[in-house]
Image (cartoon, rainbow, N blue to C red):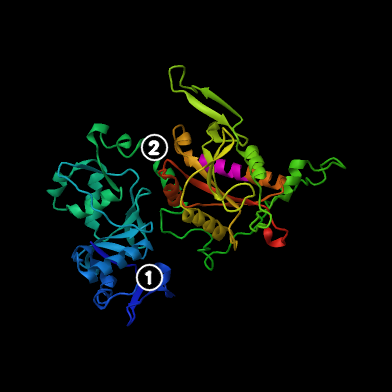
Amino acid sequence: MRARLNPFVELAVGGDGTVVATIDGATVSAGEIGLKPLSTGAAKLVPELKSGLALDQLSAGEAASEEIERLIRRLAMQGLLEFALGHSREDDAVIIEPLIPGYWPRMPQLDDADLLALSRFAYVRRRGNELVIESPLADALIRICDAKIAAALVLLSSPQSLADLARREDFPGYELLALLVDCQILFKVDRARGDGLRTGEGDDSLILWDFHDLLFHTRSTQGRHANPLGSTCPYAGQIAPLPAVRPPWPGDKIALGDLAPAGEQDSAVTKVLHERLSTRVFDDQHPITLSEVARLLDAIARIRSKWDSTLHFGPSGPVVHFAKRPYPSGGASYPLELYLSVSKCDGLASGFYHYDADAHALVPIEVRQEEIDGLLLGASFATGASVSPQILITITARFGRVTWKYSSIAYALILKDVGVLMQTLYIMATDLGLGGCAIGTADINRFARMTGLAFHVEGPVGQFTIGRPTTSPAAGR
């Protein structure tokens, strides 16, 4: 296994041992990514990171090797490395591209008696002129440089013993198979749990996911992929943007403007809808109050009633529990939960809270301040604001509430619920004289770190900032 710099990264070492990194042509100071000056012996090894430095050749106890290992670990934390199996850059078998910062390849122990199978979430696709295999469960993408490896992996669509695989001429090697097991592209079949099909892979929560839903979730949020995200305008200069208003269909129009009764006033709801804005700038001299937060949460998310049902299973079938909230939800599933990252709120200490919709109460969750700051900074970046929001609401989904019942449409239903809840937040914020702004993504890995919840059990599906707006005309639109 060799570690090497990503193609867009260059490293240079000055005469004083200072490391200078250039990323996509832009120079980054060593302090920004935590690189420390190197000794002369360690500096001599840096050029080898361009073609690849074998990790198993770093000698334990040698000062220069220990420095280089620290450098490699720091580069990995910043997502600036890739890892390769093969003899040289010209003879790579596979290249491992980390999808999350800090990824480090591991080789779990494999036994000849192990049954290995391809994960039902793994898929092979063309990317440009390359062949890659990836999975929403994986922390890294595998670039396949040898077509024989792809052919060998096809065998693992059904469980195969490692001993049988090792006897084949096209055996891809223990190291690669261990790496793929670590990435959850392959998994060890537990004979006690069945034949390696859906119920035999992963935990019970993973059983509930369809392939396309889990892939959509991980690739349309932040944290578990390295693709461009957000407003990148990737097709500017290639395709003209669509007009804001659709060209009208031909035919005679039926004017609607004069059909309202004369003198009729707009209803309160109509007025609120017309006044709705996305607010990105907040008045930190007069922050939102705990009382206003309580009124907002009561109006948008508090549980109004609860009941049980056997649905269509009959009296001998499973009992399904329901809890109605103010907004509509597909199948009355109500999978959404609210977590508040509080920066400024009169009457409420800064911190991270879960909204208990049944008890109508905020429950503090102890997390590191740097994680809260990271959430707030991400929200500021997403909205283009120069300062943190007063409160950031992270909307999560308890996915099993929907995936237990629905096939093929489960994740789509969850996102529809998110849209309905965001509109409800906008309406109530406007009615209370508050400002808010919907954010279309969130870091699912950060939330998993903060709560200890696996990303496929409960995770972010949207965010919403809330606070007291300023009177500036730039505050919202």
Count residues near mark 1 (Cα–Cα under 10 Å), then give few for <14, some for 14-19, many for 20+.
Answer: few
Can residue 84 be seen?
Answer: yes
What's the CA distance linking mark 2 and mark 1? 38 Å
Left or right relative to 354: residue 264: right
Image location (x, y in percent) of residue 281: 65, 59
Q: Residue 306: which numbered mark, if any? A: none
- Residue shown at the point (69%, 49%) measured from the top left: 434
Q: Quadrant of residue 4?
A: bottom left
Quarter of the figure that contains the N terminus: bottom left
Q: Quadrant of residue 30?
A: bottom left
Amino acid tagged 1: Phe
Amino acid tagged 2: Ser
SS category of the residue bearing label 1: loop
- Residue shown at the point (33%, 60%) measured from the top left: 97
Image location (x, y in percent) of residue 8: 38, 70
Can residue 409 be seen?
Answer: no
Q: Is residue 91 above or below residue 116?
A: below
Image location (x, y in percent) of residue 233: 53, 63
- Residue shown at the point (50%, 27%) measured from the top left: 321
Left or right relative to 253: residue 43: left
Count residues near mark 2 (Cα–Cα under 10 Å), then give few for <14, some for 14-19, many for 20+.
Answer: some
Residue receiving disc 2 = 205
SS category of the residue bearing label 2: helix
Residue 206 located within the stretch drawn in magenta: no
Q: Is residue 368 above or below residue 56?
A: above
Q: Which span of residues is magenta-colored?
A: 412-422
Quarter of the figure that contains the C terminus: bottom right
Q: Are marks 2 and 1 in contact (CB under 8 Å)?
A: no
Residue receiving disc 1 = 8
Mark 2 or 1, nearer chain start: 1
